[in-house]
Each structure stands twice: as structure tokens, then as C-alpha cells.
Image (tube, coloured by chain):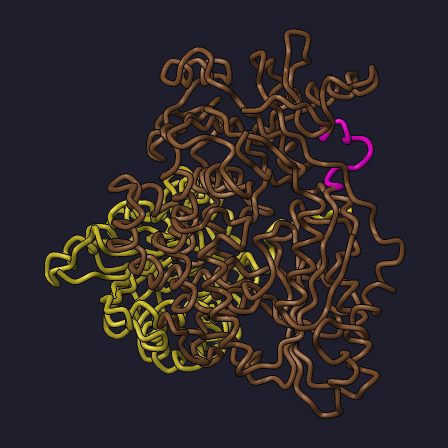
Chain colours: A yellow, B brown
Amino acid sequence: MKKASFYDLDGTLASMNILHPYLFYAANAQGIFERARRLVTLAAATPLYWATDKWSRRAFNDLFYASYAGLSEDRIAVLGEELFEEVLRPRVFPEARELVERHSKAGYVTAMVTGTLDFIADRLAAHLGIEHVAANRLVFRNGVATGRVVRPVLAGATKADWIRRFAREHEIDLEGSVAFADSSADLPILCLVGRPHVVNPDARLRQAAKENGWPVLCFGASGNGASRRIALRR
Amino acid sequence: MAREQTPEVVFLDSKSAPRLIPFGNGFLRERLPVGTRVIYAPPPLEALADPDAAIRQALVRPLDADPLHAQLRPGMKVTIAIDDISLPLPPMRRPDIRERVLRIVLQFLADYGVDDVHLIIAVCLHRRMTEPEIRRMVGDDIFKEFYPDRLYNFDAEDEEEIVTLGYTDHDEEVAISRRAAESDLLIYVNINLVPMDGGHKSVAVGLAPYRSVRHHHNPETLLKCHSYMDPQNSALHRSCDRMGAIVQEHANVFAIETTINNQMYPAELDFLAKNEDEFTELDDLKVRGFLWLLDKTPPSLVTETLRRFASPYGMTSVFAGKTDSVHARALEMGFRQYAVPVEGQSDILLVGVPFICPYNVNSVMNPVLVQVTGLGYLFNMYRGKPLVRPGGTIIICHPLPDDFDPESHPSYIEFFKRCLTETRSSFELSKRFEEQLATDPTYIQMYRRGHAYHGAHPFYMWYWGDPGRAHLGRVIAAGAEDPAVASTLGWESAPSVAEAIAMARSDLGPSASITYLHLPPIMIADVTAP
């Protein structure tokens, strides 16, 4: 049986969330009024998004991706390269690339399982050398985003479903596999593998890691190199 | 067990006061059975009045080597390796001795036009020190000038920066930092806290990768150490000496070893090192107040306060020059501070494990570390014979919570929860699991980029306890909160010291003799036959 290494993306491999790419698209929408409309709507809806995310990551993804409604597939593709170079690539944690490389070299099958959208995840996975990607996909009609995502929406438990299916299809030993995530919304995937790890965890996940004895990795500026509490002695 | 009373060796009678016993973040105050032998640390040696002058003197009049200045020339490549945060314990008040020595050595180098200077913290497989820790150790000026390009942690997993120098006649691979090996001069700045430190162990271990360290940090070698604190009778040190000889064939090593006194506590806490029968009323008041405060303060605040504690150690000597010559003198000074003559072994050895050990500075004292402190360090605080007889019992006082730091000790968690639950045999652990965790991609990542101990480190901590386990009949954890933790370590548990003693005596007899090692401050018992 093979072993796999599963990675969440936002906050785990890169210092980003699903807001960043959309902000880029909204700021680069065609026409000044369209730009203004998208940015103002985004700002106005932020409290709603925040509250929804607290309640359910899946509902949040559903709600947030509705913002993409009206963006053309062509425009998303045309701006994709720029989005990657300007927004996404600088946000990738330097340690993340090494981590993936180390697992690849050690013979792990690598897979990114993320709630972010496929055109973002695919580029980042290629950049990081991750072989397999599971990400959400927008539904397009006549080349224009409808604001809905292909079901099932990948988040929490559905990510775990994908991993189970992937493990069956690729003969992966989940007990010997590893997973990396940053949010308590990803507890279902962490609980699925034999060796879960958390990266820059939120408070709830940090507590879960402490209770379960999961290693805590700190990447980027918020990593333990910079933030670790150190006693200042006399 | 002879009953000669000295200031450091005290026998309790019915009028004796209760004894303070380190117990994790606090202390127990226990009335021990009549006849218990209590061993105290000797008083602190006088610190050097002018340590900077002593350092300069050592550099210009080294032992069996040319003076430092005579070895310098413009354009040469110099590497200075420094002991890491595991020494001394607790960390000392500023300025750290390393800062003092570095300031003077760097001035020498600058005066002689030596610009190509790197400072490497010899962490071996320990965790990388953080920026604030490094700054505190070397001082603000050196930190600003050298960090991070020319002052950094050694990286045992950076293959490009490691070079194999050769093999000993025991086929031990000697690999060390490439920068250190390829320098025209390698200066090692050490702090000798205990006689186990220093000598060839500094370079051959501190700057070595896993593939080299595994030759002596293994069950076979460690079982032949009697004890770690007696380098003459330690297979570990013999291996380091063999490796050191290879290092010296390739590198010009200039060793600087320093010793400190055992002034671990400031004046307001000096009662912790005292014979309790000699407490004044003020001491007694201080003890009561101290214990009350520890009891009433929230545990997290106690932990935080203890982490901020710094010892007022004083430097007692400094030697520079050829490694063997320097180390011999440093050892002599170390034993002058620590040695306590003791006659005869006892049936039961009682020790208290404090909040700190070399591997949890600014972190958590997990059960594997309690194990290495009790069986690896405290049991080994002897020369000659162990303080406890073969087949005797050790009582280790610690609350032993199931608590781990997932950033510093991630591999410890897997070691404790998975490996140790399958086998406690060091040979089995070594064969079945050591390489697996040592080469685990995540643990390597966390060691190199985070502040985690190497994946092999918990195994070494376990092997370190082997001589103790082989010698003893029983290990009883007194005051253990969770008997399951003690059981995973292969220990029995008792809710209190009195019950632990009763358990030990049920096996060894009602008059089984007891020795309580009143430590810290550190002492080393020179145990002879009665």
C-alpha cells in the first residue's frame, strides 16, 4: 500500500484565503462601475461572510462563490496568470514547497484538497509539485459564471469523503498517511489519516492538536521562528 | 551504608525537619523516614572577580597551543562554535558567559584583520534556538553585527553543509559542519555545567549530523557508561574522543572551556539549597510563603514565571588551548565544585524532578524528558558506584502529566504514544522505529525550519535511561497525576512520597535504606564502599 500526503491550501500552504483571488478579480473587473459594484458589495457582505463561516464552512463557500456570478470564463483565464504571479505566488510559504518536496522524495503520493477554486488550486499545485488536486469548481453557463459551484461543495466532511474515495482508488494506506491543515473546519480530514499535522492553527485547532498530540508547524511570518513566546530573563 | 555525617551528607532523625523535594513546577515538603541519608550540594565556589581578565589571560596563555593572537592572520577563515540553550540550566543572568568570551575573542580577531568569521550554535539534533534566545545568549551588539548571515544554528540536515572527515578505528563515521571543518581555525566556546559536557564531545557531537551521532547515542554504547558524569568510565566519551582525534587531524581546534559555580538560586531563594535543619525563622517563613504562592498562583503563571527565572551563576574558571588539556582542567574545576564523598549505596534512591532539563528550556517537561532527567541524569550523578544498589528502587517525584509541546517535541509524541506502547526495549525501539522517525519528512522539516527536536532525539532520551533501568529493580513515580503515563514508561506509580517509600520497602524490607539526592543545585556523589 502507498502512503499519501494531503494538504489543505488556504492558510496551510499559502498565506491566503478565498477572499484574495476574488478581490483581485473584482478589482480588475471590466468597467469602473462594475469594479465599484463588486468591491462595494464585497465590503458590505463581509460581516455576513464572517458569520456564515463561523457557522459552516460549506455554507460560507457556497455563499461566497456566488460573488463570482457574471465573471466570464475567458476573463478568469486571462487574468489567471497575473493573479498567480501577483497575488498567489508571493503568498506561498517557503516552507510549504520544501515540505511537499520532502514528502514526494520520501515516496508519498501528494494531493491538495481544498475548498478554493480549481483554477487557483491547479496553478498552486503545479507550482508546489503536488500531483493530485481536489478543489471546488464554478458552474459556467454560456461561458459566464453562474455563482454556483459544482456539487458537492468541498469543505470539511466532503473533503474527507474525497480523501476516502481517493485512497480506495489509489490503494493508499490512510493509517500511514499524513495530512496538513490550518483550520478546525478541516478536523474531518485530520481525523481520517494516521498522522495528522496542523499548520499555523486557529485557537480551536491548536487546542485539538494539543489534546491529540498532533505536531504543530508554524510557517511564514507567523511561524514559531518569529512569534514563539520566549521568556525574557533578567 | 556508612553513617558519617558531613555538611553535605546528613542523616535524618526523629527531630529532623521536613525536606523540600522538587516536584515539577513546585516543591513537596516531606517528612522522610528516620535514617534517610540526604545529600546536599557543596556551597558555591567563589566566582572569578574579573572574568574578562581571566578570559584574556586564557587566550594569550593557552594550554598546549599557541596563543590565540599568534594563530591569527588577515584573510583567514575562522568559525566559532558555541554551546546552545541546553547549557547552563536554568539559563544564566545576562551577560551570558558566551557573550563575555565572544566579545573578547571577536575583538582579538578584529585586531588581527580577520573578517571571515562565522558563529555557529552547535545544536546538533536539538531544536534551533530562536532569535530572541540567540540575542540573549550572545548579547545585542554581536547579534546585530552577525545575525543571521554569520550567526546561525547548525543544521544537521543540510547535506551540502556537512562533510565526512573519516572513520575511527571502530568504524564510526566522523562528519561535522563543512564550514567548521574547512576553516583555518575552529574555536569552540563551551560552558561546562556538568562533567559530561565539553571535551571532544563539543565539536564531534555539537556540530555533527544524525549519521555520526548514532555511533555513540545508541543502547550498546550508553549501557557501557558508568556514569555519564565520569568521562573515564563512559563509553560515550571514549567514542567522542576517538571522533575528536579524527576532527583534530583535519581541523585546527582551539577550545575555550569555562566552568561555573553552583549558585543556582538568588539570595531570596537560597533556602532551596540549604539543609532544612539549619533553617532560620526567616527561612521557614520564606519557604511557607514560597509554597503558598506556588499553590495559589494559576499554573500557567507559575510556568511563565519559572521560564523567566535566570540563575546568578558565577564563572569560576576559563581555559583555552588544546582540547584534551583544556578539558582536563575544566573537569578538575567541575569536580571541585560538585564532588561529594559518599560511603556506600542505599536500597532506595529518592529524587525530585524540577521544571527544567536540558531539552525543555522555554517548553514543556514531557514524560520522556522526566524519564531522562530521573534515570538519565539524576541516577547518573555519581562516580564510582551508583548511589543505589543493584536491584534497588528509585523513587522519582514528578506530577508526570501527559503534556507535550507539539512545536518543540513533535516526534516525542509519536515516540511516547506509538513506539513506547509497543516496546520499551531500547534495542527494539532502535531497530524498529528510530530510523523511521529520524528520516520522517515532517520531523525533518520541523527541525530545519521550525524549532523542533530532531526525530531521533526522543530515542536518545530513552536510551539515555538504559544504564539506570538495567541497574534498578523498580522505578516508582511519586505523585504521578496519571498512572497510565507512568505505566507507559514502565514505572509503577504512587500518590505520595510516603506511599512510594512504603511500596519500595514492601519489596526491599521495612528497614531498607534511603538516600535522598537534594538536587538542584547540582552535585556529584563520589560513592565508595562503606
Q: Which quadrant: the C terminus of chain B? A: top right
- Asked whether residue A34 appears in the rendered view, the answer is no
Q: Residue at x 48, y 56 (%)?
A: B452
The residue nearer to you, when weighing B436 against A179, is B436
Picture layout, residue B421 above or below residue A73: above
Is B269 magenta? The answer is yes
The residue nearer to you, when weighing B20 against B136, is B20
Q: Looking at the picture, how far across and down is residue B60, in whole percent?
A: 81, 75
Report whether A111 appears left or right of B78. Answer: left
Picture layout, residue A50 above or below residue B304: below
Is B447 magenta? The answer is no
Q: Which quadrant: the N terminus of chain B? A: top right
Residues shaded magenta: B263-273
- Asked whether residue B88 appears in the rendered view, the answer is yes
Report whether B86 appears left or right of A139. Answer: right
Q: Report the residue that reaches farthest toward the bottom.
A: B75
Q: Looking at the picture, how far across and down is residue B103, in whole percent?
A: 80, 69
Q: Residue at x 34, y 79 (%)?
A: A77
